Image: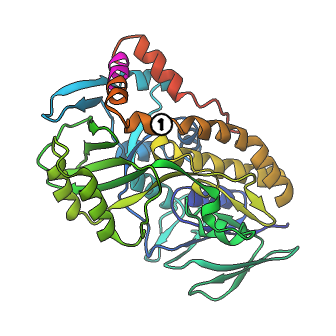
Amino acid sequence: MPNRTVLISGAGIAGPTLAWWLRRDGITPTLVEAAPAPRTGGYIMDFWGVGYDVAERMDLVPTLRRVGYHLEEVRIVDARGHRVAGFRTNAFDAATGGRYLSILRGDLAAAIFERIARRGGELVAARDSEAVETIFDDSITRLEQDDDGVDVTFEHAPPRRFDLVVGADGLHSNTRRLAFRAGTGAEHHEKFLGYYTAAFSTSHYPHRDEGVYVSYAVPGRQVARYALRDDRAAFFLILAAEQPLAIDHRDAAQQRRILHDSFAGIGWEMDEILRAMDSADDLYFDSVAQARLPHWSRGRVVLIGDAAYCPSLIAGQGSAFAMAGAYVLAHELAVAGRDHRVAFEAYERRFKPFIDAKQQAAEKFGGWFAPRTPLKLALRNLATRAMAVPLLGEWMIGRSLADRFELPNA
């Protein structure tokens, strides 16, 4: 059978999800990941819809409910910490039939990776006869395609040949840069949406509101916190920016300076939060952007997840869409008899119209999280108060949670 070996670049969420489904269908996946180990931490996110559907089919939901969180309230406060807006989250459960939870991105990634991985020689993936080969602390440096396969050069590992290559390596995808270069850099496929976001976690933060997502904003800036288990807390910051900033993504000190300059002295607990950030070892800082491509494949290379169609972090559901896209791609490879040309075309035809609509809607979300003017901030708070009104709130939330995409049968 053709296309029996697949190299997947990226061991976050999309990559391991795809590896699980490929393995189930008798295809041999290999993962390569630039980080030296599975990434941990990250922001807390809501999880429902098509991602939840895929998790159910992977029998992951019991694990996700155990490690996830049940959000009870979204609370917006003023500079003195007094509640000024917000709503209870009962409507989320009602709108999804209880198929809804909040979870740290790192915990979701770990739950998926444990299904396919071997750690320290011990087989963790109980359902699989073999674990998926994973190459950590390495990355692809060259891709050369021909009619029968792809020759891959790595930064450290010896060169190898695969039938197909999948880029699941995030918004700033190295695979996309190599395979879709066509005279332009990867940035040609990234659309900046006018915001930056940061996330981190810390221990022993003195203010805790269990089960409550507490948020504070001034025009163009927002900060939120959520209490985690084991006396930890997660923080999420959004900063409006008219133009992209000159940022070195490897320079955490520079990122901390930008956040201090932007958020210091704005009120509430902000100065305490900045001090907590200075001691955090899992700071995430990046632009809010979308990956926009006319097509998601080129020859024997195809993209999934944020590498292909990042909706933007503040839009939510990036991880859910990553899982759904991985599932659809694996399905199309299976039903196409592993003919990658037929499968890639079918994957894009089935999933891209849904994603295109989601990306267009997501461009408006930044103004919800970090309104740029006092008037827009007041209107945002008024809207959240409306969400607390019975029936009206359920209608508003149900409308926002509607996915309108049905996964093909496994």
Answer with left or right where residue 331 lies relative to residue 201: right
Segment colored magenta: 381-387
Q: Amino acid at mark 1?
A: Phe
Q: Residue at x 42, y 47 (%)?
A: 63
Q: Residue at x 51, y 35 (%)?
A: 364
Residue 271 location in percent, x, y? 15, 51
Residue 354 location in percent, x, y? 68, 37
Label 1 secondary element: loop
User: Is the C terminus in the top left, top right, bottom left or bottom right quadrant?
Assistant: top right
Examine the residues drawn in magenta and state their main secondary structure.
helix
Residue 129 location in percent, x, y? 60, 66
Answer with left or right where residue 86 lies relative to residue 140: left
Q: Is residue 27 visible?
A: yes
Q: Provide the residue designation for mark 1.
A: 365
Residue 119 location in percent, x, y? 45, 72
User: Is the N terminus in the top left, top right, bottom left or bottom right quadrant?
Assistant: bottom right
Q: Would you call the spot at circle 1 few (<14 residues within 10 Å), some (14-19), or many (20 or more)?
A: some
- The residue lying furthest to the right in this view is 147
Would you identify the image quadrant in which residue 220 lies?
A: top left
Up/down of 171 relative to 122, above or below = above
